[in-house]
Amino acid sequence: MAGIYISWPFCAQKCTYCNFASGVQPKGLESEYSAALAAEIAATDWALTPDTVYIGGGTPSAIPASDFGGLLEGIPGRPWAEATLEAAPGSLTPEKIAAWTGAGINRVSLGVQSFIRGELARTGRKHDAETVRGDVAMLRAGGIANFNLDLIAGLPGQTASSWRESLEAVVALDPPHVSVYMLEVDEDSRLGSEIILGGKRYGAFDVPSEDAVAGFYESAVAYLAGCGIERYEISNFARPGAESLHNLKYWRREPYVGLGSDAHSFDGVKRWRNPEMAVDYVARWHRGGVGREEETAAEPVEEKFFVGLRLAEGVEANASDWERFGDVFQRFLESGILVRDGDRLRLSARGVMVSNEVFQEFVG
C-alpha cells in the first residue's frame, strides 16, 4: 500500500522560523494551483492503492469548507486507514471539520509550537493557549479524536520554565500524538538567516543556546514518556497505537506519491520531486506538463540507515550491511552512540543528539 502527500503551500503569513517553500503567494495563484493539482491527480498512475493521505502546507486548514471536498476527489482507496490534515490554530470551524470528515479526513495535526503568548508573538503566530484548547474541543466534538500537537524547542525567549509550561499544557489536552522539533537554524528561514548574520530581528538575539535547546528536548522525552507518550521517532511521540501511519512510510522506505509543489515521491526504486515553488509548479502545468521535474535512483542500503535509524525501533543490519558499514557500526557502538539489540541497531539517547552526524556516515 502507498501513501499520498498533497502539498498546499498557501499561508496567511510566513512564520519567522519556517524554512518550507510556503507562505503568502501572489493573488490569483491559489485557483490556478488547484487546477494544476487536479490535473496532476488525474494524470497519476495509481499502481498502488493508497491507504494513507497527508495534506501538508502551508495552511490547508484555510481552504474554504465549500472547496475542500474537491481536493481529495480523485484519490482512490477511500476510506483510508489514516488521512491527516495540517491545521493552524484559529483556522478551524465546525463547518470546516464537517467538510474534512466528509472528505475522509480522520486525523489533524495542529501547529501549536508553544503555549506561551510572548513566544508565539515573536514567530508571527496569531493564536494563544485558549485558541488551541478550543480547537481541540472542536475537533473532538466533530468526530476527530486522533490529533497531533506540534511544539518547537528553541524559540526566541524560551526558558526551561516556559518550555515546561508548554509541555504540561500539551499533556493536559490528552493528545494521542505529539511532535517536538528543535529549532532549525538555516538561511531558508527569516529567523535562521538573522541568527547566522548575527542580527537582532525576530528575536534572534534571544534564541536559547544549543545546549539549552538540547536540554529542552531531553526534558520533553522524559516528561512525555512519564505521561505515556513514548518517542518512536526522533521528533515524534505517541501513545501506543497512535503512531503516524503515513510518516512511518518515509522512515521504513515504503512507497509514497507526492502531489503539488515541493512534493517528493518514492516507488521503492527511484525518487522524484516536483517544482519547489508554487508559481513554477503552475507554470509547468500551463506548458502542458504536470508534477515530476527531477528523478534519481534510490540508494537502498544507504537510505536504510539514513532514514531508518530515526526510529526508536532501529534497523536490522544483515551480513552485507556489516560488510559495507562494519567499521562505522563498530566505531559508534564503542562510543555509545549506537546500541545493538540482536541483529538490530538503534541510536542511544546520546546518539539521538548527534544524529545528523551519524546519518552523514551513510551517505555517499
Image (tube, helix red, strand yellow):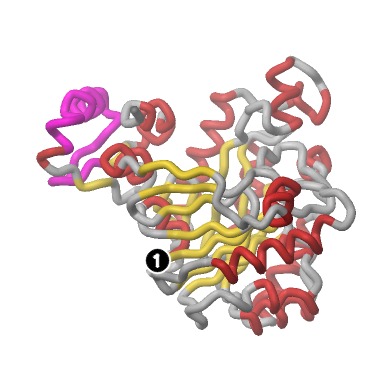
**Residue at image coords 41%, 57%:** 248
Left or right: where 335 falls relative to 18: left
Q: Quadrant of the C terminus?
A: top left
- Image x and y of residue 351, in percent: 36, 32
**Residue at image coords 71%, 33%:** 189
Q: Quadrant of residue 96?
A: bottom right
Left or right: where 245 falls relative to 106: left
Q: Is residue 169 visible to the viewer in this orientation of the structure?
A: no
Q: Is residue 74 above or below residue 268?
A: below
* Figure disc tally: 1
Q: From this viewpoint, which residue is outermost toward the top? A: 198
Q: From this viewpoint, which residue is outermost toward the right? A: 27
Q: Is residue 201 visible to the viewer in this orientation of the structure?
A: yes
- Of residue 86 and residue 139, the one placed in the foreground of this image is 86
**Residue at image coords 49%, 46%:** 235
Please state the extent of the stretch shown in magenta in the rendering. 321-345
In reply to whether residue 351 is colored magenta, the answer given is no
In reply to whether residue 328 is colored magenta, the answer given is yes
- Image x and y of residue 160, in percent: 63, 35
Which residue was labeled with disc 1? 240
Disc 1: CA contacts within 10 A as few (<14), some (14-19) or many (>=20): few
Q: Quadrant of residue 188?
A: top right
Q: Quadrant of residue 97?
A: bottom right
Q: Is residue 325 above or below residue 141?
A: above
- Of residue 260 and residue 64, the one placed in the foreground of this image is 260
Q: Quadrant of the N terminus?
A: bottom left
- Of residue 132 and residue 363, the one placed in the foreground of this image is 363
**Residue at image coords 66%, 47%:** 165
